Amino acid sequence: MTRAVFCLAMLLPAVAQGGRAETAPPRFDVGLQAYRAGDYARAFTVFTALLERGVGGAPAELRLNAALSALRLSRSRDAEELVAPLTEKQGDEDQRWRAHAAFVLGLAARQHGERAVAAATLPDAEPMAWVMASRGLQQSELHFRAAVQLRPEWGEAVRNLERTMQRRAAVEAKRAAAQPKQAKQEQAPEPEVALPELGPDASPEEVTPEWDTAALSARELQQLRQRVRDQQRRKVRGRQLRVDRARDGKGRDW
């Protein structure tokens, strides 16, 4: 139960005991006692039953008390439906009831928002959970503002408005932190190593690597040159042998 909903415990006796509360039948007192004892399900049953029968006190009082009991049971939709007719009252004498109805609607919207916040923090949260959380708290803030405008001296409405504004700011910060981080920018590919351009008459097979002779001693350079000459001699002898074999094979009948 949030701190905002906690304030409705002070609202209920004021509504229940106002107006025609002194002439209320005993069952009205049963509902009030059940609420004070924390038996919100029984209180909700009593108040809604009296409201349906049209007895047991002023309809506005019964609606508000039934709505407050519904909120204690986290039945925010039922609370909204119960107080909706009170928002349509237009007379100056009904301004207090409209303020109470706006207060209850603010608490109901707060419950919607808090449930969405809890859903948004789950590992398998729906993508729209944070949006619903922000929307619920925004609606709650608007309802409390309406209650304060109708009754500026009502301390509970002012405090709930302030708390809802603070809570909304905190939730918006959580929502921003939960947004998926932007993908890191791809690193630019490393520049390709420029290869030396070949001459117009050159081909890859004809290009020979340049030897780094500066790091070779005179003896190593001489040995390297001797190996190159030996390889050239072997290539020459190999070609000569292939030519001789070709000559010897001419005119043979295989």
Image (cartoon, rainbow, N blue to C red):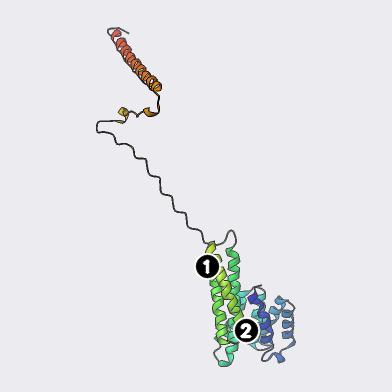
Which of the image's four quarters has the N terminus? bottom right
Residue for point 29% across, 30% down: 203
Q: CA distance from mark 2 to mark 1?
A: 30 Å
The amino acid at mark 1 is: Val
Q: Position of residue 112 (x, y in %)?
A: 59, 72
Which of the image's four quarters has the C terminus? top left
Query: Could you tell me if the residues under marks 2 and 1 are in contact, i.e. CB atoms within 8 Å?
Result: no
Q: Position of residue 87 (x, y in %)?
A: 56, 84
Task: State the mark number for residue 77.
Answer: none
Q: Which residue is mark 1?
A: 131
Q: Name the one closer to the observer, 70 or 194.
A: 194
Residue 101 sits in which quadrant? bottom right
For marks 2 and 1, the one nearer the N-term is 1
Residue 64 shows up from this direction: yes
Residue 82 shows up from this direction: no
Q: Position of residue 2 (x, y in %)?
A: 64, 73
The crowd level at tag 1 (other Cα within 10 Å; few <14, some 14-19, many 20+) is: some
Above or below for 93 versus 136: below
The amino acid at mark 2 is: Gly
Q: Residue furthest front?
A: 218
Q: Name the one closer to the observer, 219 or 20.
A: 219
Task: State the mark number for residue 155.
Answer: 2
Residue 106 sits in which quadrant? bottom right
Q: Position of residue 153 (x, y in %)?
A: 60, 87
Query: In the drawing, does residue 148 fall left or right of residue 187?
Result: right
